[in-house]
Amino acid sequence: MARPPEQILIIDDDPNIRELLDRFLVRQGYLALTAETGEDGIALAVRHRPALIICDYGLPGMDGLDVCEALRNRQDLESSYFILLTASGDMDSKVAAFDRGVDDFITKPFDFRELQSRIKAGMRIFHLNEALRRRQSIMDFDLNQAREYVRSQIPRPMKDRRAWIDFIYRPSHTL
């Protein structure tokens, strides 16, 4: 049975960029979701949990860094890979973006080959994070099972506390 296509969310206020990225992603075999504002993008991300998000920095209202930070604060979306698109490529902007949770950074105008490579790397990282999350969940379950087993093996306290203390502190006289 074929896996459904990976979902990628595009958040950009420029309809031409949204359309261009949508067509590119569909040709690459992805399912593209699009939003014009940061608020709409967050709502779509919450509803669909995309593997990857491509977001413009200069959005009206909530900018791309605000969107990223809002999504990083949600446990169900923290493993979504976040690529920030921006016209500014200066080092201070990049450092600020990475400090706020951005995973990758692409400056406009971008080359589609570079975008494709960064998307592939982002998908690989997303899948590794999801595998780690599943393994962690299994380990947590196993740990809880072991904890319950150990608790079941511990003797219950005796009702007569004197007998319990006597039992604990009575030295053995036979070997």
Image: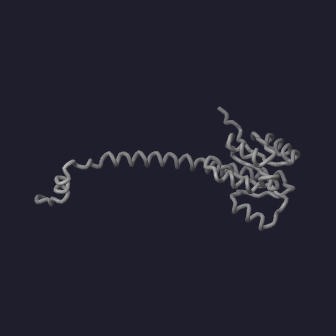
Q: Residue furthest top?
A: 1
Q: Is residue 152 left or right of residue 80?
A: left
The residue at 82%/46% (across/down) is 21
Which residue is outermost to the left?
173
Foreground residue among 119 and 151: 151
Please state, as top left, top right, bottom left or bottom right, where the N terminus lies in the image.
top right
Looking at the rendering, in which quadrant would you find the C terminus?
bottom left
Please tell me which residue lies in front, 59 or 76: 59
Residue drawn at (25%, 49%) of the image: 157
Residue 146's x, y, as percent?
39, 47
Query: Residue 81 at x, y = what percent?
Result: 69, 51
Outermost residue, right side = 16
Q: Is residue 98 above or below residue 55?
A: below
Identify the residue at horizontal 79%, vertical 57% (top origin): 106
Q: State the image coordinates of residue 2 (x, y, percent, origin top left).
A: 67, 34
Foreground residue among 121 and 83 = 83
In the figure, is residue 151 to the left or right of 30?
left
The mark tally for this picture is 0
Place of residue 90 in the rendered image (x, y in percent of width and height, measured from the top left): 81, 66
The colour mode here is one colour
